[in-house]
Image: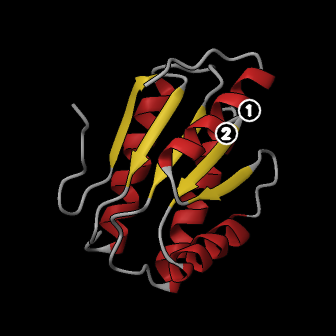
Amino acid sequence: MTKTPTERAPLVDAARWPLLRVVYPPDYGDGDAFVRSLGAKLHAAVARRAPGRFVVLADLRRVERRPTAGDRKKIAEMLNELADAFAPPVAEALVLRGELMRLIVQGVTFLQGDKRYPRRIFTSPEEAEAWLHERAREAGLDLPRG
């Protein structure tokens, strides 16, 4: 059974570790509360498995509300803090739809400025996961198949 986020909370799923799946909700509501919730969930998922290496599959296809510039900056800062607290991921695949979301995600990536791991944008979760399996294999990680 595929899990989905609640209306305004992200889903962080580590059931197939070292694949960490993050599903963003359609409307994240209050930006500060969303960033705190996302940060806490990511921190908890990674901390339970530290110092393990992992890959991230971020699914943003359901996102309808565009984050403000301030929220994008907060998300980038939170992701940097997480990467500094633990080992950064081996790779991150972002699944989204639409050119506007692509530009927004590229903006967050630019604000984050972290070049320690590859990121790639996809429109298909299957393509994203195949790419992550390849990056994981190159890094000596064994990802379970979905």
Q: Amino acid at mark 2?
A: Trp
Q: Tell us which disc is closer to us: 1 or 2.
A: 2
Determine the image quadrant of residue 102: bottom right
Crowdedness near tag 2: few (<14), some (14–19) or many (≥20) residues, C-alpha within 10 Å: some
Return the residue found at the far left: 7
The residue that label 2 is drawn on is: 131
Q: Is residue 18 above or below residue 103?
A: above
Residue 29 spot, x, y in % from top left: 25, 73
Answer above or below: position of 90 versus 107: above
Q: Residue at x 23, y 63 (%)?
A: 8
- Residue highlighted by disc 1: 135
How many numbered discs, if any? 2
CB atoms of marks 1 and 2 within 8 Å: yes
Question: Crowding at label 1, few (<14), some or many (≥20) Cα neighbours within 10 Å?
Answer: some
Q: Is residue 92 left or right of residue 9?
A: right
Q: Position of residue 118 (x, y in %)?
A: 76, 48
Q: Which mark is residue 110?
A: none
State whether residue 91 is above or below residue 10. above
Quadrant of image for the N terminus: top left
| Quadrant of the frame with the C terminus | top left
Q: CA distance from mark 1 to mark 2?
A: 6 Å
> Looking at the image, which is closer to me, 106 or 49?
106
Write the residue at 73% across / 71% down.
110
